[in-house]
Amino acid sequence: MASEPHTLQPRVSAGRYRFRWHSAAFLATMFALAMIAMAAVVVSSRASSTPLLDDHAMSASRALATTRLPEQIQLARAGELNLMLPVFQEEVTAIGYHPVDGEGVVIMSPSGRQINGSILSNLNVFSDSDGPGYFLMSEGGLQGSATCSMDVGAPAGTMVFAPVDGTIAGIRSYNLKGQCPDTEIKIQPQNQTRLLVVMTHMINLEASLGQPVRAGETRLGAVRKMDGCVEQQLSQYTYDSGNHLHLQVEHLKSNSRP
């Protein structure tokens, strides 16, 4: 009787090993079945998502996303002129001010708070009730006030709306720095006959010369893709390439046309 534990031990051990072998086979089988099921799900999901990749569907989706009107948020004042947000607020990546060369440029008084290079540069830009956050960007060798021009960052293709009430006084094409095709729009603000609001870095223009416009309602065009053509200073304050709408206000010179 004393030897029974020794004679039973090998059978218990063998059974344990058989159990482990069957467990390994079971797990391998389940893994294989899981992989097959996953593959079926992926194939099915790809098949069901294929219509979303249709060019017409994507274009319609983008058109819907870019036609939302921006809130009536004041970005800055230029003299007695209020400059309103020209793109849908959720599309804004950053707002930056910097000097520009040239005479007759009106100094702006930004609304809101200066962010001063916070790592949260493109988060909660409009969280302050006093106005949107903004950056004072480096001078870059340019002369003039630090707030005589404004860059409103937004992804390329974002719809641009008029920042003031007024009339389209000028439209022209030019080459930025002699190498990047660009378009400039000038708006003569309502009741401000000696000022012009100048906007650049736009494509797909919907504005026409002499057209009346309303702030935050009239579509002018879309933000142009400038990355790969020029280095965009605003990219130092955003998490993207820094595409943006450029805006400044100028005095209308005597005996000159817009």
Image (spheres, rainbow, N blue to C red):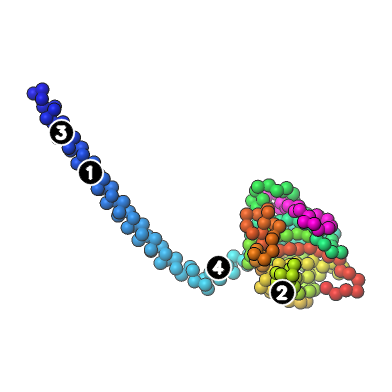
Pick the front one: 84 or 159: 159
Residue 213 in sight: no
Find the distance from the CA under tag 3 to the CA under tag 4: 70 Å
Q: Position of residue 14 (x, y in %)?
A: 17, 37
What residue does disc 4 label? 61
Estimate how packed mark 1 is, as few (under 14), some (14 to 19) or many (20 or more) residues with alpha carbons within 10 Å.
Answer: few
Pick the front one: 29 or 76: 29
Q: Which residues are magenta?
A: 126-147
What residue does disc 3 label? 10
Estimate how packed mark 2 is, as few (under 14), some (14 to 19) or many (20 or more) residues with alpha carbons within 10 Å.
Answer: some
Residue 240 colored magenta? no
Identify which residue is drawn at 32% across, 58% down.
36
Classify residue 184 as left or right of residue 42: right
Of badges 3 and 4, nearer the viewer stands 3
Q: Amino acid at mark 2?
A: Ala
Q: Amino acid at mark 1?
A: Trp
Q: Assess whether mark 3 and mark 2 are in contact (beta carbons under 8 angstroms).
A: no
Q: Which is nearer the N-term, disc 3 or disc 4? A: 3
